[in-house]
Amino acid sequence: MISLSDYNHAHSANSIAVSVKDLGLTYTTSIDKKPTLKARLKSLGRGKKFTRTVRALSDVSIDVHYGTVLGIIGSNGAGKSSLMRVISGIVPPSQGRVEVFGSVSTLLALGVGFNPAMTGRDNVYLGGLAAGMSRNEIDANFQAIAEFSELGEAIDAPMRTYSSGMYARLAFSVAAVVEPDILIIDEALSTGDAKFKEKSLNRIKELRTADRALILVSHALATIEDICNEVIWLNNGKLMARGKPTEVIAAYREFVDARKSASSDEDV
Amino acid sequence: MRAYMGSLWARRTFISEFSRSELREQNYGSLFGQLWLILNPLLLSGVYFLLINVIGGKSDSARFAHLTASLFLFYLIANSLTGGVKAITSGQRLILNTSFPRIMLPISATVVALFRFVPTLVVFFGIHIILRLPYSWQMLWALPIILIAIVMSLGMAILISCINVYFRDISSMLPYLTRSLLYLSPILYEAAHMSVRIKKFEIANPIFYLLDSWSRVVVHAEAPSAKGLIHASVFAISIFSLGTYFFLSRERDFAVRL
């Protein structure tokens, strides 16, 4: 779901949109060796608590300028989504500083806040309001949303009758009408059928303007290379490389291939 | 804080729409749908009519009216607590993927409870006419009493939603807590009929004097006691302030805790 955190502002190209300095993010999760009441009571008595510390991000520093489309790549658990959540203000950083100069929209998951018992039409309003739009803005954009989703008469059917593709199409269509200063998208382009994926991709391309910054997380390296003009590569919460898409993606591929061959050697 | 309140105010339409959708979901697929908002209090009052007037063999209209009126207001608070307790934990996807004032979620739980309470007022108005209960201008005290009940419900929903993030067992304990509150409050009995020895302990019950004032006003058409109003207001404001402070001070931690 997109969330619009502030009002839109006018920005000159190349001015800073997001500044991240020495960012660290640490989660502490409690773990029980024996998840029983007896074990809990015993640990209470000793004042001990079994916890595991997860370092999701470590000393990450990046600046994102207006006019930039920044791609973020990395394997699962690299810290991509954590970085997106910190930038968009969902999770507070454990260390370092994050400064955002403009309104931020996040498209981290599709259809968040939707109610399956309600019709597609009702959910357009619910999703739009959750994104920070006013009812008048949704009224004005409703036709465009309905047409983009290609749902036809199904827009008035309860969403619990939708296929996952239809669900994703409507969710992306609601999100696509918001035009923020900084747009953060996490894996949202990998939904729907091939035709809708292409349509979503084109919409993202339309949003590339000099007075907007886009941050895109994806495992689809070809898409990242096609859309982005800058890429960063994260691994185990650390910034491994930053630069032109072709160079960073090549370095990442080389790293992944080396790891694959190392693990296949081990298998032998 | 000012920016936070501004952001909350800007999303007031979302709170209303979100609450409506929750309410619609509760009655989704049922034959009577939203009509259950009226049917529920009607059937509840019918059950107590059966208990008091038919099985009990008493035609005590004031007792029946007291019971239904007090239950309806009690359910505003109990429904707010029940909806509030899981407001944050069940909104996990929303919290992890969207930046918005988290306090909107327990507020929505109270708005849902309020949507369910309003039809009960209509039902009670009908009961009031049928039983030919007295009327007076003192009944206008019902408005500030409802306002106090809303502030208390809101405070309780905000507080319990936050407690549940850190202590999940509270949601399992809640049915017993609300049931205890029901029996310790003047609902099944009237406050005037209690012994002075027991009544002095009721100062610790946040809703005791609220329900007593409500019954005096809407059933007996009398003015509430000053002590009753002050007690209810102090508890409502204290719970609301404590709940809001606790919630706002812990809010940034929710995304990591869920």
Image (cartoon, helix red, strand yellow):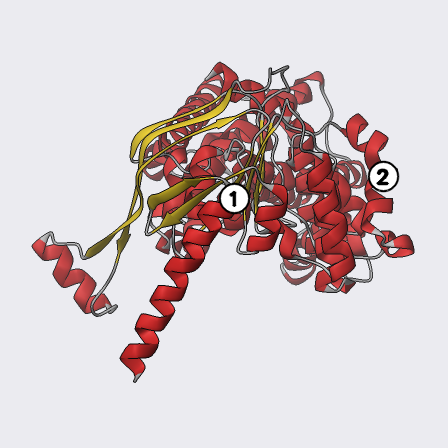
N-term-proximal mark, 2 vs 1: 2
Q: Residues within 10 Å of mark 2 (few under 14, many from 20)?
A: some
Camera-nearest label, 2 or 1 = 1
- The chain ID associated with circle 2 is A
- The location of residue A4, given as percent across then percent down, is 61, 30
- The location of residue B50, given as percent across then percent down, is 69, 59
Q: Is residue B85 visible?
A: no
Q: How many marks?
A: 2
Name the element at disc 2: helix
Residue pointed to by mark 1: A245
- The location of residue A5, given as percent across then percent down, is 57, 27
Q: Is residue B226 visible?
A: yes
- The chain ID associated with circle 1 is A
Nearer to us in this view, A204 or B25: A204
On the rendered structure, is A80 left or right of B213?
A: left
Residue in view at x 47 percent, y 30 percent = B209
Q: Amino acid at mark 2?
A: Ala
Q: Residues within 10 Å of mark 1 (few under 14, many from 20)?
A: many
Tell me: residue B46, above or below residue A146.
Answer: below
Name the element at disc 1: helix
Tell me: residue A249, above or below residue B197.
Answer: below
Q: Do marks 2 and 1 both belong to one polypeptide chain? A: yes
Residue in view at x 63 percent, y 56 percent = A190
Tell me: residue A117, above or below residue A125.
Answer: below
Q: Amino acid at mark 1?
A: Pro
Q: CA distance from mark 2 to mark 1?
A: 33 Å
Residue pointed to by mark 2: A144
- The location of residue A171, given as percent across then percent down, is 71, 48
Tell me: residue A31, above or below residue B79.
Answer: below
